[in-house]
Image: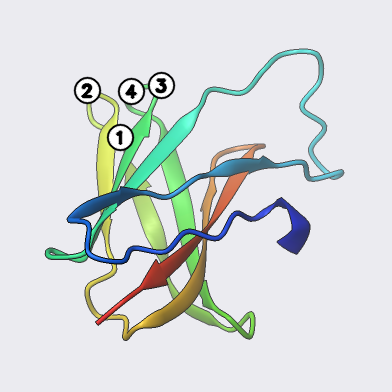
Amino acid sequence: MIAMMLLFSIGGAMAVEVPMKENNNPDFPSGPHRSPALQANYDEYTGELALLYSESGAAYTYYVYDEDGILLVGGTGAFNLAGTSSINLGVLPSGYYLVEVVFDTVSYVGRLYIEE
């Protein structure tokens, strides 16, 4: 799974894209169809991870792990009719994090660096 993650540094930008890649979980074969795309942008001023998904109303579970793989934050959410949702990460100190967003049978992972 770590090989599939992309490292992204925030560095001085206000909102930065966090690349989210589909996690090919062997317990949930994706079959011949392509999963809807998930986009994520982190706003360093508000601490919000804004999510955009191609299926409005979809429910998800999210997990945020530190660089040692320890679960720090988790919860559930749903996308509104515009296909947007957000996760508040403003409580996390600076450092590297793995963000995982899980739908019924598909999960997406991305690597985020939060700078103070």
Label disc, if present, on residue 79 of the rendered structure: 1
- In the image, which disc is placed on residue 51? none
Disc 4 + disc 3, Cβ < 8 Å: yes
Do residues under tags 3 and 1 come within 8 Å of each other at their CB atoms? Answer: yes
Query: Which of the two labelled residues, at mark 4 and mark 1, occupies the earlier sequence position?
Result: 4
Check contact, mark 4 vs mark 2: CB within 8 A.
yes
Q: Amino acid at mark 1?
A: Phe
Quadrant into which the N terminus falls: bottom right
Mark found first going from the N terminus, 3 or 2: 3
Q: Amino acid at mark 2?
A: Ala
Label 2 secondary element? loop
Would residue 12 appear left or right of 102 to someone viewing this image?
left
Residue tagged by mark 4? 56
Who is closer to the viewer here, 101 or 94?
A: 94
Q: Amino acid at mark 4?
A: Ser
Pointer 2 residue = 82
Q: Residue at x 31, y 66 (%)?
A: 11
Q: Which residue is mark 3?
A: 55
The answer to whether residue 81 shows anywhere in this view is: yes
Q: Are marks 4 and 1 in contact (CB under 8 Å)?
A: yes
- Does 104 appear above or below 70? above
Picture layout, residue 72 above or below residue 8: below
